[in-house]
C-alpha cells in the first residue's frame, strides 16, 4: 500500500524491515506475557504489513486468530506502540503459508509430520495450558526411553492439532472431577490411560448417558498426557467430523492426505463413536486407522452413549477391537455424588453452598451433571441480582422450573399399561415372537419409552419383552426416533404417552 499523501503517512516498509520490526515486537511481547503464552500464541505469528493506520499480523488458523482477537489485541497494540512510538490498530488475518511454522526437534518415537500445525491446549486468557509447574520434567525424568509410545519431550510445548474440534477446558482435569461410586472405575481407568498412553488401556472406551462426565474425563486424559509429554500430538474430534472429512476426501480424491492427518498422531480422541452405525465405508476406513495407530503404540480414546456391542450395524471386527483395551461405563451420579458436585461447583465460584440448599438441588436434579452445574450458576446469579442470600426459599423461587415436584419415576408396569391401552394389544403379544406391524410397532414404542423414562439397562428392557437382546432394544429406540421425525402421527402418539407417564 503506497503513501496516501496525508500528513504523517509513510511508505510501506520492505519485507526485511517488517521482519526486523516483528522481532522487536516479539521482544516487547515477551516482556508482557508469560513464556507459555508467548510460545502458544505469538511464536508462530508473523508481521505481514504495516502502514500509517494498522499493523497486519498473520496467524496459522482461524482459532488462533479468534483467540488473539478476543484476549490479546490490547497486548499486541501495547507492544507495537512500544516499538514504533505511535499507536496502530491491529489487523489479524489467517494465512498458513505466511504464518511462521515452529519446527521443534522431534523425539525419537514421534514422526515429524504436522508437528508445526498444532494449537496448544490452552483455553483461558490466563494462559493455563497443559501443566507447566514442572510436572512435564518430572514425567520425562521418570519415563524410560522406549517404554511407551511417547518419549520425553525435546521441544517446546505442543498440544492439540489445529484441526481438532475442541479447545481443552482448563477446568476439565482429573483434580476437578468429583469421584463417586457411579464413576470411580471410569475415573481410575481414564487416569491409567493418561499416565501410560498406548499401553494397558488402549483403546480406552468410555460410555454413558448425556451429561454424566464423559467429556470431562476425555479432556482430563489429554491434559494428563500433555503434562508428561508436552509435544504429544493430539487429534480430538467428533465422529461426525471424521465421517464428514472422509466423505470430503472421497469426493476430492485426496484419501492419502486424509489418512496422513489421522494416522500420524500420538493420541486420537473420537467423541460419539456410535455415529459410525450404518456407515459401512466409513467403518472400513476407521478400522484401518485404528489398526495403524494401535500397531504403532499410539493411544486411542473413544466415547459413546452405549457399549461397543450395542452399537447397531457396527462391524464385528470393530466391536472386537474396541474391546481390546478398557471398556467402562459412567452411570448417572448417585445422591451423595450429586451433593458433592453441587458443593464443589459452588466453591469453584467462591461461594459455600448451604447444606440444605445443596440437598434440595441434589434431590431434584438426579441424572445430569451439566444440569447440576447450571442450577448452581443460575442460583448464584439470581441471588446476586436480587440482593438476597442463598436459602432454600430463594432456591425454590429461582429454580422453580427445575425443582418441580415429581411423582415417583414411571415403572415398566406403568409403561406396559399405557402402551397396551393406547394400542389395544396384550402384554402376551408384546412378549411374543410375533413381528407383524400391529404388534412390533407398539413393542418398539414401549422399548423407546422405557429407555427414556427409566434407568433400566438395554438388557433389562429387552427382558421385559420376551428376553430380547440389547441390539433389538437399541434398534427399536433408533426406529421410533426416526419415525417421530418423519411421521406426525408417531410423534403425537409417543409424546402423548410420555406426557402421561411423566405426569405433565
Image: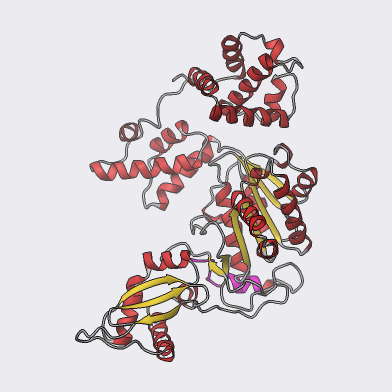
Q: Residue at x 54, y 30 (%)?
A: 485
| Image quadrant where one finds the C terminus | top left
Is residue 129 within the magenta segment?
yes
Residue 380 image position (x, y, % from top left): 33, 44
| Image quadrant where one finds the N terminus | bottom left
Relative to 197, 421 lies left or right: left
Is residue 168 within the magenta segment?
no
In this view, the residue in front, 273 or 352, is 273
Give residue 69's quadrant in the image: bottom left
Give residue 86's quadrant in the image: bottom left
Residue 129 image position (x, y, % from top left): 50, 66
Q: Is residue 129 above or below residue 101?
A: above
Q: Which residues are drawn in magenta?
A: 128-140
Q: Residue at x 52, y 73 (%)?
A: 96
Q: Is residue 42 above or below residue 431?
A: below
Q: Residue at x 58, y 38 (%)?
A: 209
Residue 100 image position (x, y, % from top left): 51, 79
Amino acid at each position: 500500500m503506497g503513501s496516501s499523501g496525508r500528513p504523517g503517512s509513510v511508505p510501506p516498509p520492505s519485507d526485511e524491515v517488517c521482519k526486523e520490526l516483528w522481532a522487536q515486537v516479539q521482544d516487547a511481547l515477551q516482556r508482557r506475557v508469560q513464556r507459555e503464552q508467548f510460545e502458544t500464541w505469538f511464536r508462530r505469528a508473523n508481521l505481514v504489513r504495516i502502514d500509517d493506520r494498522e499493523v497486519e499480523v498473520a496467524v496459522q488458523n482461524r482459532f488462533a486468530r479468534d483467540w488473539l482477537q478476543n484476549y490479546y489485541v490490547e497486548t499486541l497494540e501495547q507492544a507495537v506502540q512500544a516499538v514504533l512510538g505511535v499507536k496502530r490498530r491491529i489487523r489479524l488475518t489467517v494465512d498458513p503459508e505466511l504464518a511462521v511454522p515452529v519446527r521443534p526437534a522431534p523425539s525419537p518415537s514421534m514422526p515429524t509430520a504436522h508437528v508445526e500445525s498444532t494449537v496448544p491446549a490452552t483455553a483461558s486468557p490466563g494462559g493455563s495450558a497443559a501443566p507447566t509447574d514442572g510436572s512435564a520434567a518430572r514425567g520425562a525424568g521418570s519415563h524410560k526411553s522406549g517404554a511407551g509410545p511417547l518419549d520425553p519431550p525435546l521441544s517446546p510445548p505442543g498440544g492439540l492439532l489445529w484441526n481438532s474440534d475442541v479447545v481443552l477446558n482448563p477446568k476439565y482435569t482429573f483434580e476437578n472431577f468429583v469421584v463417586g461410586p457411579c464413576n470411580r472405575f471410569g475415573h481410575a481407568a481414564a487416569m491409567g490411560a493418561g499416565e501410560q498412553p498406548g499401553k494397558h488401556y488402549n483403546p480406552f472406551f468410555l460410555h454413558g448417558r448425556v451429561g454424566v462426565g464423559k467429556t470431562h474425563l476425555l479432556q482430563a486424559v489429554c491434559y494428563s498426557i500433555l503434562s508428561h509429554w508436552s509435544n504429544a500430538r493430539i487429534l480430538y474430534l467428533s465422529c461426525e467430523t471424521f465421517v464428514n472429512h472422509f466423505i470430503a476426501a472421497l469426493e476430492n480424491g485426496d484419501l492419502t492426505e486424509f489418512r496422513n492427518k489421522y494416522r500420524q498422531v500420538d493420541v486420537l480422541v473420537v467423541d460419539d463413536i456410535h455415529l459410525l452405525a450404518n456407515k459401512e465405508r466409513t467403518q472400513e476406513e476407521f478400522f484401518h486407522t485404528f489398526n495403524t495407530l494401535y500397531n504403532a503404540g499410539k493411544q486411542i480414546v473413544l466415547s459413546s452413549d452405549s457399549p461397543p456391542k450395542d452399537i447397531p450395524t457396527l462391524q464385528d471386527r470393530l466391536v472386537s477391537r474396541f474391546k481390546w483395551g478398557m471398556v467402562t461405563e459412567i452411570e448417572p451420579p448417585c445422591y451423595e455424588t450429586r451433593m458433592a458436585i453441587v458443593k464443589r461447583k459452588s466453591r469453584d465460584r467462591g461461594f459455600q453452598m448451604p447444606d440444605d440448599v445443596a440437598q434440595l438441588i441434589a434431590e431434584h436434579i438426579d441424572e445430569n451433571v451439566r444440569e447440576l452445574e447450571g442450577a448452581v450458576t443460575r442460583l448464584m446469579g439470581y441471588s446476586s441480582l436480587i440482593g438476597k442470600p442463598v436459602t432454600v426459599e430463594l432456591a425454590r423461587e429461582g429454580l422453580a422450573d427445575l425443582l418441580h415436584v415429581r411423582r415417583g419415576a414411571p415403572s415398566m408396569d406403568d409403561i406396559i399399561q399405557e402402551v397396551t391401552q393406547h394400542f389395544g394389544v396384550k402384554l402376551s403379544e408384546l412378549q411374543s415372537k410375533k413381528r407383524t406391524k400391529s404388534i412390533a410397532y407398539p413393542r418398539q414404542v414401549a422399548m423407546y419409552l422405557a429407555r427414556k423414562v427409566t434407568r433400566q439397562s438395554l438388557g433389562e428392557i429387552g427382558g421385559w419383552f420376551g428376553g430380547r437382546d440389547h441390539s433389538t432394544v437399541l434398534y427399536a429406540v433408533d426406529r421410533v426416533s426416526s419415525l417421530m421425525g418423519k411421521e406426525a402421527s408417531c410423534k403425537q402418539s409417543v409424546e402423548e404417552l410420555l406426557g402421561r407417564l411423566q405426569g405433565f
